[in-house]
């Protein structure tokens, strides 16, 4: 278990990952809060669930709960740099679903409800899967503690 945790939390990304983590974490948290809590003009679990059901993602309420939780809590973990790789992997999966179930048929551009923004979030998530959280993160603190006590 210690080896797995060390692998998940270690990173050689330096401080550069922080510049990616902060905005991506905030964006994902805001989108998750729309789905979960109806904040920022969102529709909450009931409204988002009904919409998801209408586009074939059933059961809609569960899908809204899963997507909203991945976005809100995954975004929070990315913001904090805590278990960044698994959080980013969950968010990458969420973006793949969003791109292909909602946006792909509309083409690339956001002005047509295309997949442009989802693709950017997917790329950022995949980048964090590979790089890890970097030095300014809770992962770095955990990793340092684990290697000191090895």
Image (tube, rainbow, N blue to C red):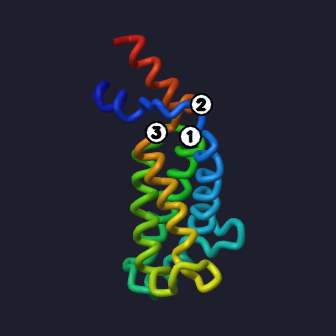
Look at the numbered discs 1 and 2 and tell me whether their residues touch, using CB distance below 8 Å: yes
Q: Quadrant of residue 66?
A: bottom left
Q: Using the image, tell me which numbered label, if any, was put on residue 143.
A: none
Q: Secondary structure at mark 2?
A: loop
Crowding near pointer 2: few (<14 within 10 Å), some, many (20+)? Answer: some
Q: Nearer the viewer, residue 63 or 76?
A: 76
Q: Residue furthest right?
A: 40
Badge 1 is on which residue? 17
Look at the numbered discs 2 and 3 and tell me whether their residues touch, using CB distance below 8 Å: no
Q: Quadrant of the N terminus?
A: top left
Q: Using the image, tell me which numbered label, if any, was put on residue 132.
A: 3
Q: Secondary structure at mark 1?
A: helix
Q: Nearer the viewer, residue 17 or 32?
A: 17
Label 2 to label 3: alpha-carbon separation: 11 Å
Q: Nearer the viewer, residue 147 or 70?
A: 147
Expressed as whole percent of the image width and height from the top left, the position of residue 56 reads: 39, 85
Above or below: residue 147 compared with residue 100: above
Crowding near pointer 1: few (<14 within 10 Å), some, many (20+)? Answer: many
Q: Using the image, tell me which numbered label, if any, was put on residue 136.
A: 2
Residue at 50% x, 27% y: name it: 140
Going from N to C along the chain, the mark reached first, 1 or 2, is 1
Expressed as whole percent of the image width and height from the top left, the position of residue 107 reads: 51, 84
Drawn side of residue 29 relative to residue 70, left or right: right
Front disc: 1 or 2? 1
Expressed as whole percent of the image width and height from the top left, the position of residue 12 reads: 46, 30
Label 1 to label 2: alpha-carbon separation: 8 Å
Going from N to C along the chain, the mark reached first, 3 or 1, is 1
Look at the numbered discs 3 and 1 and tell me whether their residues touch, using CB distance below 8 Å: yes
Q: Quadrant of the C terminus?
A: top left
Q: Secondary structure at mark 3?
A: loop
């Amino acid at each position: 278990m210690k080896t797995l945790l060390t692998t998940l939390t270690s990173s050689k990304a330096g401080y550069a990952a922080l510049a990616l983590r902060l905005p991506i974490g905030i964006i994902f948290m805001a989108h998750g809060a729309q789905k979960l809590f109806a904040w920022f003009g969102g529709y909450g679990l009931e409204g988002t669930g009904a919409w998801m059901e209408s586009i074939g993602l059933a059961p809609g309420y569960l899908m809204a709960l899963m997507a909203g939780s991945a976005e809100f809590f995954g975004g929070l973990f990315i913001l904090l740099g805590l278990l960044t790789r698994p959080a980013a992997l969950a968010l990458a999966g969420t973006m793949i679903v969003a791109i292909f179930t909602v946006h792909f048929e509309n083409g690339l551009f956001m002005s047509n409800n295309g997949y442009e923004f989802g693709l950017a979030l997917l790329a950022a998530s995949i980048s964090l899967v590979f790089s890890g959280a970097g030095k300014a993160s809770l992962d770095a603190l955990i990793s340092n503690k684990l290697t000191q006590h090895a």
